[in-house]
Amino acid sequence: MPGLRQPWRSRGLHAAMSVLRCFFRDFCHSFQRPVADSPFEGYPSQFLHSVMQETIESSRRVHRNDLSGPRILLPYYKGLSEKIQRLGRRLQFSVCYKRGPNLRSLLRTDKVKLPIDKFPGVVYEVKCSCSASYIGETGFTLAHTFSQHVKNLKRYKRPNKNLRGQTLKQPRRGRPPSLPPLVPMERALAASAVAEQCCSLLRLTADEDIM
């Protein structure tokens, strides 16, 4: 080929080597295959073999220099990320890059923003007047979880009033309870730590009133 006798420009040489590395990635382990039978017929054989050898050496070099230190995830910034990567090779840590937010994600406003008490799967804290606090985690929404705590508190207070001999202002409809009052009271306290704390304060207040 007459073009091969002339010296290649630096940009064209790097582009050709990059293309050949991509094509030879799947063929770098089969040196027995003749170059004339490959789809790269017409290129200098010495140049092809040098690219193949460089590809194999670079892949071995990557496995040999696999860093055992920590791995840091950073957004990519041109120029700065390359310096951090070179610094990581010296200090034995690896750097992975993530894609930053694009213009569409920054300007998009069609997402429905739910209030905090409507998000499922939250960690919440309940503070008591006695400076005690309860931290819990739920897979439901915050409003549903607090309604469950209130229901368990009511399930404790109804049989507790019956146990103390206090009658309700409005009698409950339906069948009378078949279990002794202590059973639903214990179940309500076991199901909710918030109800247990409230009931302990109620008992403490009642004892102070008696004294």
Image (cartoon, helix red, strand yellow):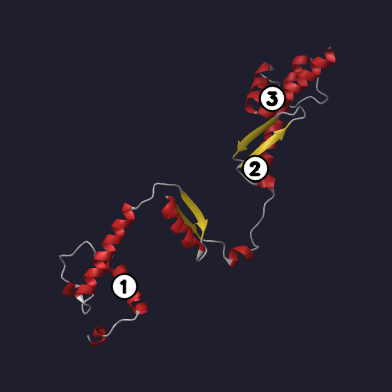
Q: Which residue is mark 2?
A: 141
Residue depicted at 37% across the width and 78% down the height: 11
Identify the mark nearer the N-term, 2 or 3: 2
Q: Which residue is mark 3?
A: 196
Question: Could you say which quadrant of the image residue 18 lies in?
Answer: bottom left
Residue depicted at 28% across the width and 64% down the height: 55
Three-letter residue code for mark 2:
Thr
Residue depicted at 32% across the width and 53% down the height: 63
Label 2 packing within 10 angstroms: few (<14), some (14-19), many (20+): some
Secondary element at image label 2 = loop
Left or right position of 171 against 47: right
Question: Of all residues shown, which one is farthest toward the top?
Answer: 211
Q: Position of residue 206 (x, y in %)?
A: 80, 17
Q: Looking at the image, which is closer to me, 211 or 15?
A: 15
Question: Could you say which quadrant of the image residue 197 lies in?
Answer: top right
Q: Looking at the image, which is closer to me, 170 or 152?
A: 152
Three-letter residue code for mark 1:
Met
Secondary element at image label 3 = helix
